[in-house]
Amino acid sequence: MLRLLGAALAGLVLWPVVLEAQKDVAFPPEVYAARRARLLDRVGGAPVIVPSAYGVHVDQGRPDPSFWYLTGVESPYAILVLTRTEGRVRETLFLPDSFQFAGAQYPIDDARFRRAAWNVGSGRLSPGDDARRRTGIAETVLIDSLADRLPALLGEASTVYFARDGGLYAPPSLGPALTVKQQLEQAIGRLLPGRRFEDVSPHVAALRLVKDEHEIAALRKAAQISALGMIEAMRGVRAGMNDLELAGLMEYVWKREGSPRPSFGPIVMSGDAAVSLYTLRAERYHSTDRVMRAGELVYIDYGAAEYDTYTSDLCRTFPVSGRFSEEQRRYYEIVLEAQSAALAAIRPGVMMIDVIRAAAQVFRDHGLERYEDIDGMGAARVWGLMPSPTYWLTKQGPITRYSGARGTGVRDLGHHIGLEALDGRDWSRPLEPGMVFTVEPKLYIPERGIAIMIEDMILVTPTGYENLSASAPKTVADIEAVMARN
């Protein structure tokens, strides 16, 4: 292991490297064509409409994951329409023209400025031969013609599948706030009255659960880059730094290695500030008023690097001073044992609930169940064990659905990962080769200011599993060895 760590550390020499730019179409066109064909099979050949992300310019953000999964196209304001009539598949990709949504700003309406060399979209696709060649979709047309073309494309189909999103929260007693996609679906419904609209998103999500060789390669690369960033954090941490400084060290490494952006917002917490669910603490991430102190643990679940639009999610907990205290080591090794027990249970055909129970049993074996007794401990002192509650899971209780809005349910052990860091939590089907998910047991001890999580990205293989993020040190000995090289 130390030999591997040495090789990883050697890779951190700060020499300039030549990197291949991110591509507008990541994988060969036939990969996306096969996905579209499988999707049409799942919906019985009914028409499918999948919009892309609707941002323009710098606020575009990441592409819509369902649209990207089916096309590989990152251009904004694009819409995919799939139909099948008498066995014949028709694929139509609606795209903006070359200068639509361009950024020129002048006080006069002079179309010539739109064609200036500095006003050309970077890598955007527009209708024509280049788009057909790059996407493998024969019919590429202007987005502005959508309303005119849709009736003929959908024909007499009574059911239309549309890629919805999760919707927005609205306070009780108020009508729902509509997302851009929901507004688009309603507008199409008015254009095509009498049709029944169904959500195609669950079908796309089911396809996305099992990754192909191209996706696995991208996820493996993202995980490896993230591990290099984590090693840099271990080497660079110092008492007196604030959390944002440490995040910056990691981000530099990721960008140097070819990752254009993090998978999600950075979560770097230290000491008693880390004894909080990461989603809550992330709301205040940009605060820099707390510095790390000698003797504390630092907890990094920093939305790790992305590669070819595939994400990574990695967490490590380590001592600011470079060595675990006896108490920190004891609890850290319990969490690591829980993760190891979960990993040992992973293989094709296993249900995820059994993987979760394996981790929960470790917490029970170490006598931690009594610290979950909120009646005895009180809300200010009760420990957080995840998966939780251990007594429920180990007594054959099922996973119960939890809600961030309501703050209810049983926290499990991880989530699927792919085009999104949180690619879903569908544990209703047995594990199968090609699934990639995180395994991330956690432990929060408020009265002692201890928060520990160990998270890895796990690929199910035909014979067991592969830890895609294994190059990030996680045993006490390996972490302390890396930190000793500071």
Image (tube, rainbow, N blue to C red):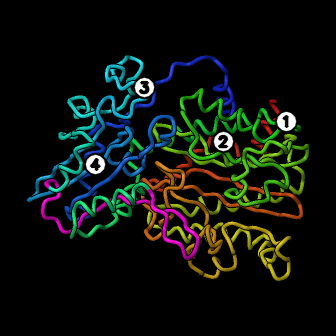
Secondary element type, mark 1? loop
Is residue 300 left or right of 54 when viewed as pictured? right
Instruction: Give amino acid for label 2.
Output: Ala
Instruction: Please tell me which of labels 3 and 1 falls first in the chain.
Output: 3
Residue nearest the observer in this picture, 238 or 472: 238
Q: Which residue is mark 4?
A: 80
CB of mark 4 within 8 Å of CB of mark 2? no
Q: Residue 385: horizontal and vertical position, in percent? A: 73, 67
Label 3 SS: loop
Is 131 left, or right, of 245 in this rendering? left
* Screen quadrant of the C terminus: top right
At mark 2, the secondary structure is loop
Q: Is residue 236 above or below residue 220?
A: above
Mark 4, Cα crowd under 10 Å, few <14 / some 14-19 / many 20+, is some
**Badge 1 is on which residue?**
238
Above or below, 415 against 289 in this view is below
What stretch of residues is rendered in magenta?
A: 152-179
What is the CA distance from the residue labelled 1 to the residue labelled 4?
A: 50 Å
